[in-house]
Image: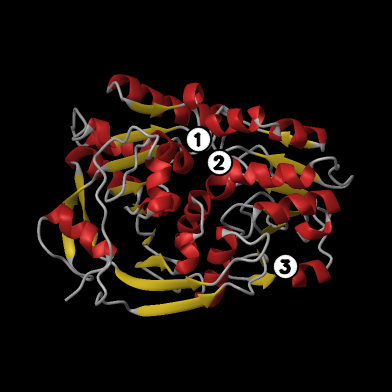
Amino acid sequence: MGQTITEKIFSEHVGRKVYAGEIVRCNIDMIIGNDITTPISIKAFEESGAEKLANPDGFALVLDHFIPAKDIASANQAKISRDFAYKHNLKNYFDEKDMGIEHALLPEKGLVVPGDVIIGADSHTCTHGALGAFSTGMGSTDLAFGMITGGNWFKVPESIKVVFTGKLQPNVYGKDLILELIRIIGVDGALYQALEFTGDTIASLSMDDRFSLCNMAIEAGAKNGIIAVDDVTKEFLADKKLAREPKYHYSDPDAKYVRVVEIDVSKLEPVIAYPSLPSNGKPLSTAVADKIKVDQVFIGSCTNGRLSDLKMAAEILKGKRVARHTRLIVTPATQKIFKEAEKLGYVDIIIDAGGVISNPTCGACLGGYMGILGDGEVAIATTNRNFVGRMGARSSGIYLANSAVAAASAVAGYIADPASVQ
């Protein structure tokens, strides 16, 4: 019987053919920790009596959620992580000196590689499936077990094949594809299943769009999102010193899927997820007709804080001003992206338009800092979740959108079509 790409990755790691439903123990290529969840892992690691990491070079610690620290509690969280990094002389340790949001930084550094098995104590670890890897979020104690043993137990997930066909319309991106899929199948439509993204549309997507697509697989309940390696992937990897030799896996023609979802994107508008679920998607034209006033626009996060996002924002904002009653916050996902955006003039354009640019951080996305919403405020954001209270006050409302729509809305002061302000 044929295998899916996810089954093949596990088979290669286990040393025999495995299929969906099997529970396997396998080695992990990269374990990812951050300043929020890793202190719990560190405590479990030390209480176990372990003295060293099973695979030090396969552990990356990224301080990104509350860095620079916003208060004493977050400073102490970071201190636990820093002390551990220094004690174990971690090679892959990133803080203010080379900072970035983990799910943008690690691909940039070549630390996640096609064919890898990757875990992180962060639900959006599924982002790295865009590189043809199995990548998933786990709990902090699961992370500790991996730190101690170098492996973990997995139930090999069944796969849903998602087939995107057709040419994208202007101002439609990977973010819209995943929001449309979640609208169709719901936030529990892929529970503990792999979302395998295929179809001729995928070939036309940039790596930035692919990262956005896989990033939000978890918002459909998926265990992982994954895209097979192609020329676009290889071009992205070409200038990187990869941590390991890449291994390319492709699903067999007779692979078994629990479901096939086909989506023709040729007439798809940008999708806006209304409060308070990512599945509450509506066409942009509906949102425009609803005349939704926005207090805050946020462009950033591990979903849409990449260079292409800053580029599309700058192209829309050039020569314009953010609406008087609206504030715009832009967060580049890494320092490298920040520097490149500055070199290309995007930073000046955003600031001249009335926007503010923060250091790379997860801050605003999780309602941590750098963009908290007040009572009754409305935001349009390029983030991945719009749950009640996600970005601040429980009475606030969050609309999810791509970066072009977000930038256009900053200018209009209402959710707007980019075509109307360009």
Disc 1 designates what residue? 64
- Residue that sits furthest to the left in the current view: 16
> Going 21% across and 61% down the picture, which residue do you hit?
8
Check the image and report above or below for 180 versus 238.
Answer: below
> Going 28% across and 62% down the picture, which residue do you hit?
250
Disc 3 designates what residue? 284
In which quadrant of the rendered view does residue 39 lie?
top left
Please name whichever residue, 337 or 230, is drawn nearer the observer in this view of the structure.
Answer: 230
Disc 2 designates what residue? 362
- Residue 128 visible: no
Residue 176, x across and y down, in percent: 59, 63
Please name whichever residue, 326 or 177, is drawn nearer the observer in this view of the structure.
Answer: 177
Residue 4, x across and y down, in percent: 27, 68
- Snapshot colouring: secondary structure
Q: In terms of sequence position, does the residue under pointer 3 or pointer 2 come before the other?
A: 3
- Residue 336 visible: yes
Q: Nearer the viewer, mark 1 or mark 3?
A: 3
Left or right of 351 on screen, residue 2: left
In which quadrant of the rendered view does residue 9 lie?
bottom left
* Three-letter amino acid code at the position of disc 2: Cys
